[in-house]
Amino acid sequence: MNIVLFRDSRVRVMETTVTNAEKYFGQFCSLLAAYTRKTARLRDKADQLVKQLIDFANTENPEMRAAMRNFAEDLAKVQDYRQAQVERLETKVINPLKLYGTQIKQTRAETSVQRASVDASHTTQQLEETVDAFQKQKLKDLQKIFSDFVTIEMVFHAKAVEVYSSAFQTLENYDLEGDLEDFRAKMRGVYGHYEARPLTDTTPSTALPWSLPYQSAQSTIRSQRKEEEASEDDSAEEDPVEDLRRQGRDSSNRMRTAQSEK
């Protein structure tokens, strides 16, 4: 009686081994397949971001346009690596786990037949050999599948860090002041163009700095920036906008004087 109980206990252990493999390998397959799909969706969203960055860059001044285009190129490279990551996950992780379902079913069929034979012959040797071989192969496969998973992830992240470092430097090197100078010069040039009409009896406004001619505004900005660079630590430095306003008032006074002389 004890022999029979011992034999049944060993059989249950072997059956549990196959059942657990079927359960958990199925869950691994489902979760890692979802992981891979989400990675693919992340790649798609990042591709959309790249497109939007390029569209935005085309509306900006030269420095920002160049920075955003370079930044977008780096993000696009990361998505190329992410695409390779998705393909490798499918090939080296998902597909082996899918195939494992078939292997488990085949092992379960074999153990069922051998279980019937055990009941008849009172021996478990053949069943033990089958389950032992299954367990050995299962552990080896599990080791390889997750080693491949980690390797794929490490390769992607190593490449991504390299490209993201380049993207970070692109943003760090962006010349914000240069773009602002270009933007302000263009604004003043546009307003100056609209106000550069023949003078009648209308007195120009002295409250806006935009009444300065384009070249005068450009020269004022350049000289102002030189003064700022030469006296960075001078807390009493004049406000550049107020300086432009003062020059605008001086220019208006000169115009009034010229008109009165006539």
Image (spheres, rainbow, N blue to C red):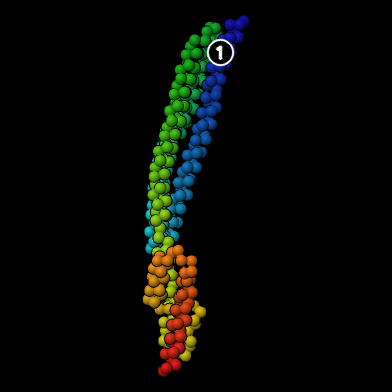
Where does residue 253 sit, x and y in percent of width and height?
Answer: 46, 85
Q: Which residue type carries mark 1?
A: Arg
x%, y% of residue 202? 48, 88
Residue that carries the numbered disc 1 in the rendered image: 10
Question: 182 or 229: nearer the eye?
Answer: 229
Q: Is residue 13 visible?
A: yes
138 and 233: which is toward the camera: 233
Along the line of sight, which residue is nearer the eye, 144 or 216?
216
Residue at figure coordinates x 49%, y 10% from the top left:
125
Residue at the image position 50 percent from the left and 23 percent from the top: 105
* Observer-nearest of 38 and 218: 218
Is 110 rendered above or below residue 167?
A: above
Q: SS class of the residue under badge 1?
A: helix
Residue 65 in sight in this render:
no
Residue that appears at 57% across and 10% down: 7
At which x and y percent is residue 34? 51, 38
Q: How crowded is mark 1: few (under 14 residues within 10 Å), some or many (20 or more)?
A: some
Q: What is the quadrant of residue 119 in the picture?
A: top right
